[in-house]
Image (cartoon, rainbow, N blue to C red):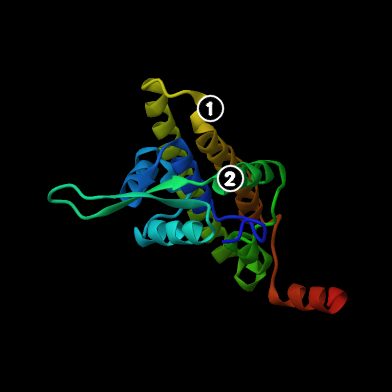
């Protein structure tokens, strides 16, 4: 993970942010991600992903080993701290990620690009399914934010959660429109129409 050659993964940014706060070990970082609800921002389903990212950051000299600690009855834990290069790189990456939108190739737009391979009826059902799932995710995210707010957590540290909710609501609103048009027949297709379209624009 050479800082001058590529942008970091979201997990690398979160980990660098943790060691910028204070020296820490992998287990503690994994727990912080879950405690702060950042497992909705970075993928830590596999605990090994934290260790792999720490190894990459260490190889890039963005973090270094501060100490190796061993408490009775617990496994040995390596405590990492940020290096001067890591601190400089973290701020450079952070400003770039905030200010420069990057192209992201997500699976949903790819599925939309080929939705005509399904019948309108099947497409309608699948988009309804997605919309309902997103509504559930939005309700859960809003509930979590309210709980943190009730505990006195300031908005500043929940901006990522707020952003996620805005995106979820925007997609739900858009899906509602498409689903409505599929139901009414305003958005429709069949094999004959698709062949004619391919002949015209292919």
Q: Can you give x and y, in whole percent of width and height, for residue 147 in the image?
A: 37, 27
Label 2 Cα neighbours within 10 Å, binned few <14 / some 14-19 / many ≥20: many
Q: Quadrant of the N terminus?
A: bottom right
Q: Quick one: 73 or 98, which is closer to the camera? A: 73
Q: Classify mark 1: helix, strand or loop.
A: helix
Residue 127 sits above or below residue 163 on the image: below
Marks 2 and 1 in Cβ contact (< 8 Å):
no
Q: Is residue 136 visible?
A: no
Asked whether, in this view, residue 143 is left or right of residue 127, the answer is left
- Report the mark closest to the observer, 2 or 1: 2
Residue 59 in sight: yes
Mark carried by residue 90: 2
Quarter of the figure that contains the C terminus: bottom right
> What residue appears at the point 69 percent right and 62 percent down from the top-left corner?
188
Task: State the mark number for residue 156.
Answer: 1
Residue 153 location, x and y as percent?
Answer: 42, 24
Which quadrant holds residue 81? top left
Q: Residue furthest left?
A: 73
Q: Residue 95's image quarter? A: top right
| Alpha-carbon span between mark 2 and mark 1 | 19 Å
């Amino acid at each position: 993970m050479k800082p001058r050659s590529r942008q970091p993964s979201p997990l690398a940014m979160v980990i660098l942010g943790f060691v910028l706060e204070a020296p820490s070990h992998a287990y503690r970082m994994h727990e912080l991600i879950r405690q702060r609800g950042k497992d909705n921002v970075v993928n830590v389903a596999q605990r090994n992903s934290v260790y792999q990212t720490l190894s990459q950051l260490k190889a890039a000299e963005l973090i270094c080993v501060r100490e190796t600690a061993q408490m009775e009855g617990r496994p040995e834990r390596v405590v990492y701290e940020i290096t001067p290069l890591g601190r400089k790189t973290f701020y450079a990456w952070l400003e770039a990620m905030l200010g420069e939108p990057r192209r992201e190739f997500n699976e949903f737009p790819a599925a939309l690009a080929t939705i005509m391979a399904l019948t309108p009826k099947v497409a309608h059902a699948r988009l309804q399914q997605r919309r309902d799932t997103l509504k559930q995710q939005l309700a859960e995210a809003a509930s979590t934010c309210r709980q943190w707010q009730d505990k006195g957590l300031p908005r500043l540290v929940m901006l990522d959660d707020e952003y996620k909710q805005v995106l979820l609501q925007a997609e739900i609103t858009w899906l509602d429109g498409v689903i409505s048009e599929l139901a009414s027949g305003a958005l429709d297709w069949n094999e004959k129409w698709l062949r004619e379209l391919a002949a015209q624009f292919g």
